[in-house]
Amino acid sequence: MKINFSSLAKGVTIGVAVGAAAYALSNATKKDKRMLKSNTGKAIKAIGEVFEDFGTMF
């Protein structure tokens, strides 16, 4: 059986990111929530770049 590590890594990373975002959002003040929303796009883009780099390693 061949395991696709790329898909596994993506699933784990997305789960961790969603959990961290939910925790940060639940404990944030109104100002922090506004900053969190503005930085979300940058974080998603960075995660995508990490996946691309990780994929090229294999």
Image (cartoon, rainbow, N blue to C red):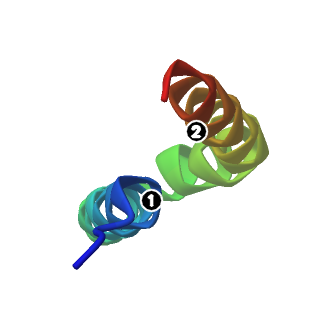
Name which of mark 2 and mark 1 comes first in the sequence: 1
Evaluate whether residue 28 shows in this view: no
Q: Residue at x 77, y 46 (%)?
A: 41
Q: Foreground: 41 or 3? A: 3
Residue 21 vertical placement versus 1 (above, below): above
Callout 2 amino acid? Phe
Asked if residue 1 lies left or right of residue 39, the reply is: left
With 4 as the anchor, is 39 left or right in this view? Answer: right
User: Is the residue 52 above or below the residue 25 in the image?
Assistant: above
Tag 2–tag 1 contact (CB < 8 Å)? yes
Residue 49 in which image quadrant: top right
Q: Secondary structure at mark 1?
A: helix
Counting from the top left corner in percent of width and height, residue 14 is at 42, 64
Q: Which mark is residue 51?
A: 2
- Which structural element holds mark 2? helix
In the rendered image, residue 44, in percent from the top left (x then y), is placed at 67, 47
Q: Residues within 10 Å of mark 1 (few under 14, many from 20)?
A: some
Q: Residue 10 got which mark?
A: 1
Picture quadrant where residue 8 is located: bottom left
Would you say residue 53 is visible in this rendering? yes
Q: Nearer the viewer, residue 53 or 57?
A: 57
Give the amino acid type for the residue marked by disc 1 in the picture: Lys
* Most foreground residue, 41 or 14: 14
Q: In the rendering, at what x and y percent does residue 33 appear?
A: 54, 56
C-alpha span from label 2 to label 1 = 7 Å
Is 27 above or below relative to 44? below
Residue 6: quadrant of the picture: bottom left
- Percent position of residue 29, x then y: 40, 55
